[in-house]
């Protein structure tokens, strides 16, 4: 069904037409009519499935511009909050809806001025929103639509107690929309008292990388990880590469070293000032930076188009995070490559990833690199030997 068959207003159809939206995604096709009917929903769908438009478009149609904070959208990170605001503003180009955002890392003054002018939709991270409420800058008494986005991520980051406090500050008579990639037990428990007879939307979980992504593990000893990273970059023709590290310290160290090698580099992690984070993300999206070094804050939800390569400097501890990380490349049917540096200590995590995605991930070595000995190479040689013997036996038995 096309967008014009979902019940959206002409002004929204005009906006999304100008944005190049052609056909609704599965979550949009299912969610938009239900939200327009005023239903509570719980939608389980992966990042990149069009969730922002799924809740944003019908919510814009349900609001009357001019009333203070009719809709509250809670997001786990500053970057996601800003991304949602940008999307809502683009959807409401031909409407008078006022959209505002509050998150940490920036001064209160401008946010307070924006709130005093009034907004119809407020997008916020939980901590900064509670701060503003405590200062008397915000009232949630007029909220008609409450949207909780990336709820499982908020659980992972320890935000659920703050989220529960904020929910209790909203009117009981409201529409509530839950969007989450997964629905663990803690979220199921919250749903029981937050949602009113919800409609359930489940879009199949994506446990694997897109078919357009070629991914591989590169075994290496810990002492040579950085050298191997540089060699990979030297031997790879990339337009934009996203490097993930497990720690903020490594992100800063790698970025400084790459800058000394004349790479244009942005850095994204939670210890960076908000202005730096915004500049890094904008610079990477615009092409000013060819490399973005980030912790997992960038892996979940952010829409970064045109990434040709993803390099995992560390194997992610969570198998699902691996799929989120490498999902930053190979988008919109374009080809992408994902490289993961693998040390002996990370072998267990690598096995968990292979189990999760349901396939063995190729181990590769770079030519003309002076490798130090690793037990991982023995494993690969044994596997290669077993395969050779198996092929030979197959030929003999014919």
Image (cartoon, helix red, strand yellow):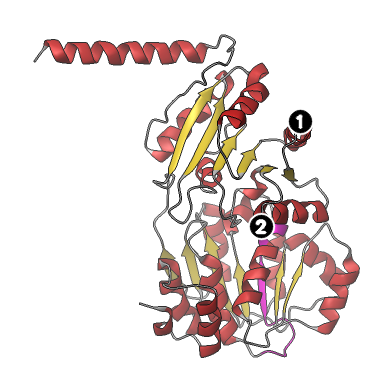
Judge left or right: residue 281 versus residue 307.
right
- Determine which of the numbered discs, if any, sits on residue 257 in the image: 1
Give the structural element (helix, strand or loop) at label 1: helix
The stretch drawn in magenta includes residue 179: no
Residue 369 pos. (x, y %): 57, 16
Look at 62% across and 43% down and name the residue there.
242
Residue 340 pos. (x, y %): 54, 31
Q: Distance between the residues labelled 1 and 2?
A: 38 Å
Q: Name the residue under label 2.
A: 160
Residues marked 1 and 2 touching at CB (< 8 Å): no
Look at 58% across and 21% down and name the residue there.
345
- Determine which of the numbered discs, if any, sits on residue 334 in the image: none
Residue 363 position (above or below residue 77):
above
The C terminus - image quarter: top left
Disc tally is: 2
Look at 44% across and 67% down and name the residue there.
27
**Earlier residue among tags 1 and 2:** 2
Residue 94 pos. (x, y %): 62, 86
Look at 71% across and 82% down and name the residue there.
98
Judge left or right: residue 110 versus residue 4.
right
Kindly indicate the quadrant of the structure image that contains residue 302: bottom right
The N terminus - image quarter: bottom left
Q: In this rendering, does residue 52 appear at all?
A: yes
Residue 297 position (above or below residue 341):
below
Tell me the magenta residue range. 65-80
């Amino acid at each position: 069904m096309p967008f014009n068959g979902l019940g959206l207003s002409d002004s929204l159809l005009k906006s999304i037409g100008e944005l190049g939206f052609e056909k609704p995604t599965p979550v949009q096709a299912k969610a938009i009519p239900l939200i327009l009917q005023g239903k509570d929903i719980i939608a389980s769908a992966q990042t990149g499935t069009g969730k922002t438009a799924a809740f944003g478009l019908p919510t814009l149609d349900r609001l009357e511009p001019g009333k203070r904070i009719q809709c509250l959208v809670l997001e786990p990170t500053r970057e996601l909050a800003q991304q949602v605001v940008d999307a809502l503003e683009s959807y409401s180009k031909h409407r008078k809806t006022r959209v505002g955002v509050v998150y940490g890392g920036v001064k209160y003054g401008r946010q307070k001025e924006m709130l005093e002018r009034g907004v119809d939709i407020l997008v916020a991270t939980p901590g900064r929103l509670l701060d503003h409420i405590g200062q008397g800058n915000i009232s949630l008494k007029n909220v008609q639509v409450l949207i909780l986005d990336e709820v499982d991520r908020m659980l992972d980051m320890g935000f659920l107690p703050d989220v529960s406090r904020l929910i209790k500050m909203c009117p009981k008579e409201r529409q509530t929309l839950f969007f989450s990639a997964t629905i663990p037990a803690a979220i199921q428990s919250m749903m029981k008292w937050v949602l009113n007879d919800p409609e359930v939307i489940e879009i199949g979980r994506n446990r694997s990388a897109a078919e357009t992504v070629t991914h591989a593990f590169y075994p290496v000893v810990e002492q040579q990880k950085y050298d191997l990273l540089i060699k990979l970059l030297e031997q790879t023709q990339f337009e934009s590469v996203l490097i993930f590290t497990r720690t903020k310290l490594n992100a800063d160290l790698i970025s400084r070293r790459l800058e000394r090698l004349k790479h244009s580099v942005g850095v994204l992690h939670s210890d960076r000032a908000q202005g730096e984070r915004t500049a890094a993300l904008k610079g990477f999206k615009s092409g000013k930076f060819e490399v973005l070094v980030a912790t997992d804050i960038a892996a979940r939800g952010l829409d970064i188009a045109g990434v040709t390569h993803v390099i995992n400097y560390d194997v992610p501890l969570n198998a699902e995070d691996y799929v989120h990380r490498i999902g930053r490349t190979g988008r919109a049917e374009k080809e992408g490559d994902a490289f993961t540096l693998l040390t002996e200590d990370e072998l267990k995590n690598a096995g968990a990833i292979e189990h999760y995605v349901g396939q063995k991930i190729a181990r590769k070595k770079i030519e003309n690199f002076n490798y130090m000995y690793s037990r991982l190479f023995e494993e690969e040689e044994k596997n290669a030997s077993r395969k050779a013997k198996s092929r030979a036996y197959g030929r003999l038995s014919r």
